[in-house]
Image (tube, rainbow, N blue to C red):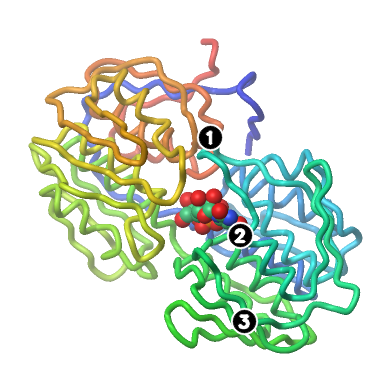
Amino acid sequence: MVLQKGCGILHKLVINGGKKISGEIKLQGAKNSALPILAATVLVEGQTVIKNCPELTDIYVASRILTHLGCKVTRQEKETVVVSNNGITCGFISEKLMREMRSSIIFLGAVLGRCGECSLYFPGGCQLGPRPVDIHLSALRKMGIMISEEHGRINCTAPNGIKGAKIMLEFPSVGATENIILAAVKAEGETEIKNAAREPEIKDLVSYLVKCGAKIEFSSESTIRIKGVDRLDGCEHSVIPDRIAAATYLAAAAITDGAVCISGTSQLDASSFTGYFEHMGCSVYICNDKICLKGKNRILPVKSLKTMPYPGFATDMQAIIMSVLCKADGTSVFEENIFESRYKHVDALNMMGADIKVYGKIAVVQGVKKLYGANVEATDLRGGAAMTVAALAAEGTTEITCINHIDRGYEKIDTVLASLGADIKRKPEFQ
Ligand code: UD1
């Protein structure tokens, strides 16, 4: 895998729009599942075999953090990553590694759970507005962990061991829920998380940990109970499919009036996102391990799309669905309730001929008949994916730079889309 860093040595995507996206693909594993599971391997003894682990730059960063901590990480076949943990040698993660991705914060709970102490830096990641970790830290404090913060560094120790606690989250933060689970699985006593995040990726993390010997149960949809155990042993686990990538490829078919079948989706609750495409007038079929979508010549607008914690409309799908609705017959209205600055893709879509107006957390999308190719810059992971989707339906050529953002979450997006009939090429940025 080629790792791209910063914008200096990037590649760009060159897309000649107008081709229908049609055909069949196999879905990649979920980035947002694979990352916390990789972090969780810090807690287990011996070998973990992670199947369906996508080949992404974020996964590579997580592997480097694991190697730095003393684990051995190898990619055995295309989709399988093996982590051997014969003891962690270090409870410190450097600023450089931490800043490469937001989800590096998940290592906090894992390293604490293993070593009883951890020192790391505030994480990097997408520029979606402030991304504090106050909910993570206040929960960890309840578990007997002493935390000090200095110059962007977080130092944690548990002088009397990590203790189970009753924790009520003020917001069902995905990362905070994962960090608490990771800190609690080997803690003394029982931890209860109320108002926990309910995302499928949390359930996948729990399923991996339970296979390793953890005692975790969902006592209601949003309450998780964890009884600390002394030891966890490595196991084999297959990562769930990526629902955001699935929505992206469905969007590519919807906006081009194409027809796509995505296989490997049996473990997905497809109804949590296919409904939006049905509202747009697309036909969606779900059977066995496939989701298929057939586009509609004119896309129908969706009156109201409000991002919410799962099972609500996912913030990660907002930009992608917005691209499709740029071409709808009428007005669609979005409300972004999870992140403060998650409309950064709007300027690029408007440069491509879209008509989107943003009023704080509201975005009003007036459908247009045509989108046009333009030179745009990927602003963040899903924003970049949204530009790619729009470019497929645009008249003329679109060049998208800073695609390192897109490569964080999509396994070879250019190859996948080309296999579905897109005219898309990855080129060095200055060619
Ligand atoms: C995860 C996903 C990301 C998705 C997001 C929301 C991964 C690797 N990333 O990110 O793709 O967009 O869930 O579904 O799984 N917040 C606080 N204080 C905290 C923690 C969060 O104020 O301590 C706020 C955040 O600033 C944000 C909101 O809560 O506005 C949601 O954050 P959270 O659910 O924690 O998202 P992530 O885990 O970062």
Judge the density around disc 2: few (<14), some (14-19), many (≥20) Cα neighbours within 10 Å. Answer: many
Q: Is residue 54 visible?
A: no
Residue on which disc 1 sits:
405
- Cα distance in 3D space between marks 3 and 2: 17 Å
Mark in front: 1 vs 2: 1
CA distance separating discs 3 and 1: 33 Å
Residue 325, picture quadrant: top left
Residue for badge 2: 80
- Name the spot of residue 195 as percent of width and height, x first: 49, 73
- Left or right: 136 as drawn, with respect to 337: right
Amino acid type indicated by mark 2 = Thr
| Of 293 and 142, the residue lying toward us | 142
Dot 1 or dot 2, earlier in sequence: 2
Q: Quadrant of residue 119?
A: bottom right
Q: Which mark is residue 211?
A: 3
Q: Residue 94 in the image: x percent, y percent?
A: 82, 45
Mark 1 and 2 residues: CB-CB less than 8 Å, in contact?
A: no
Query: Eyeballing the image, is 121 above or below 138?
Result: above
Residue 378, position in %: x, y? 47, 28
Indicate the secondary structure of the residue bearing disc 3: helix
